[in-house]
Image: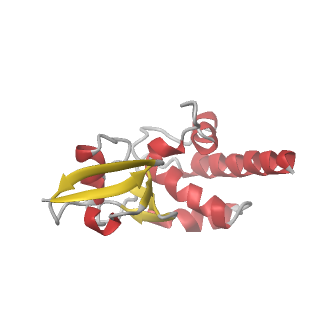
Amino acid sequence: MTKLTMTVNGVERSAEAEGRTLLVDFLRSDLGLTGTHVGCDTSQCGACVVHVNGRSVKACTTFANACEGAEVTTIEGMAENDGSLGVLQAAFQEHHGLQCGFCTPGMIMSASELLKVNAAPSEDEIRHWLEGNICRCTGYHNIVKAIQSAAATMAGAQQAAE
C-alpha cells in the first residue's frame, strides 16, 4: 500500500492504495466520489472520463499512482461553488441530453475539454470529439444540442464579462 495524494475537485485528498489500483476505483472506493462510472473496464465506453491536469483521461485504465500530485476533476467538480449545476450539467438537463444517465458524467467531462479547446464547435466537431464516449440509449442528438447550448451560454457569459 502506498499513500497517494492528489488535488481532487480543488481539495487535496490522500488515501492508501495498492500499485495496481485504477483511478476510477480510487475515486469511487477510497475517496467516495461515485459520480465517475465504470461501464466497460476496457476504455471503450467513456463513462469513466475525468480530467487529470486539465486533460480527459479514461479512469478505468489509468493507474491511481500515475496521478500522484496531479489535479483531478470529476463530475462532482463540475458543479458551481454553491452546489448548483454547472453550465454543462444544466444544459444536459434542459436539453434532455441524458436518458438513463449512465454515460452522462463521461460525456460532460469530455465535452468540457472540447469547449476549452473549441468554444464554438460545430455539430460534426462535437460528434467527432465524443467518438470515445458511448451512449447506449442513443441520446446523441440531445447530447449534441446540450453541448451547443452550453457553448452558447458560456460565450454569452464571456461577452458579458468583457
Asked if 93 appears above or below 153 in the picture, the reply is above
Residue 34: quadrant of the picture: top left
Task: Tell me how many marks there are.
Answer: 0
The reply to whether residue 40 is in sight is no
Q: Residue at 58% x, 49% y: name it.
A: 143
Using the image as rendered, state which of residue 106 and residue 123 is in the foreground: 106
Q: Residue furthest left?
A: 1
Q: Position of residue 162 (x, y in %)?
A: 87, 51
Q: Position of residue 112 (x, y in %)?
A: 58, 55
Using the image as rendered, state which of residue 100 and residue 80 is in the foreground: 80
Asked if 120 appears above or below 37 in the picture, the reply is below
The reply to whether residue 6 is in sight is yes
Quadrant where the N terminus lies?
bottom left
Q: Residue at 14% x, 60% y: name it.
A: 18
Q: Position of residue 144 (x, y in %)?
A: 62, 52
Using the image as rendered, state which of residue 10 and residue 36 is in the foreground: 10
Asked if 39 appears above or below 63 in the picture, the reply is above
